Image (tube, rainbow, N blue to C red):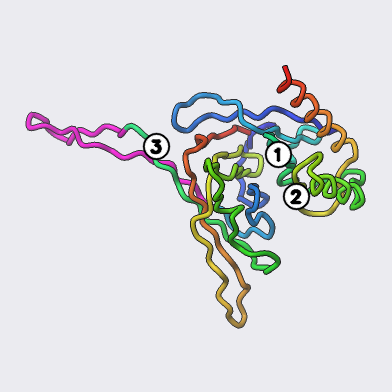
Amino acid sequence: MAALTKARTGLGATISGTGLVTTQIVSIGGIKVSVDSLNITTLSTTGFEDLRPSDLRKNPDLPVEFNWLGAAPPITTAMIPSAEPYAGIAVTITLPSAGSIQGTAFVKEVEFPSAKQGEIMRGKYVLQFDGDTDITFTPA
Amino acid sequence: MFSLKQQYGISLSTGENKKLQQFQILFAGTLVGYLPYGERAQIQAIFQFPHDKLDAAVLAKLGKEAAEGQGLASVTVEGPEQYSRQFVEQVEKALAEEDADDDE
């Protein structure tokens, strides 16, 4: 699959994962992978302080908004696996012709819709990547 | 035509190109979904695409087999139910090959 040659919007992006709401998705993410910075400045440092990265990446969370259809419970043991040994949900986010991001996660938060006149009912869940399987990126 | 391609991903911690536990499902070279594998495979996130019918009866059969503990564990369908029988055959073939690899 060829990567994009011209930038485009997120229309067409998808998310998959057992038990997750994957239809009527309104927005996904974004994912922010980060690492802490450690200060290694000493008394002999001059000019700017000295920093270096910490050892491990931090697992991101990922908010997903969807149109609320009410067909199924929004939070189940499929979303928060309870079986031991723990194994997270394999999640894949596919960007339209722009690669995909994979990793294991669990749902850490579900938000029911606000009911308002003149406003679409939308729900939201937040995935927490768990590091069980490294987050990986597959180029387009 | 449909094809299944072993998916690899670059670890965002080590930079290693890792073999992932899923196939990419391609139709005429376009990514249309994923087929994770494990003890029992699941077809997930089959994106909308035009093709000859994989109709409701075939999906029902797959679902029934899943309920009886055979075949695929689950089938998630999104968009119009227009998926190819050939695709199902390829999935079954790939799974059989996966089983054969496991037996070796």
Tell me the subunit letter for badge 1. B
Which residue is disc 1 drawn over? B34
Estimate the x, y position of residue A74 in percent, counting from the top left.
61, 63
Could you tell whether A70 is left or right of A102 in the image?
right
Of all residues, the one furthest to the bottom in this rendering is: A117
User: Closer to us: mark 1 or mark 2?
Assistant: 2
Q: For residue A37: magenta?
A: yes
Distance between mark 1 and mark 2 Cα atoms: 11 Å
User: Which segment did they paint magenta?
Assistant: A29-54
Q: Residue at x 58, y 61 (%)?
A: A75
Q: Quadrant of residue B97?
A: top right
- Which of these two is toward me, A42 or A134? A134
Query: Few, some or many C-alpha atoms within 10 Å of disc 3 (few <14, some 14-19, many ≥20)?
Result: some
Q: Quadrant of residue A37?
A: top left
* Secondary element at tag 1: strand
Any mark on residue B54, and which? none
Mark 3 and mark 1 in contact? Answer it, CB < 8 Å. no
Which residue is disc 2 drawn over? B76
Q: Residue at x 74, y 26 (%)?
A: B98
Which residue is disc 3 drawn over? A57
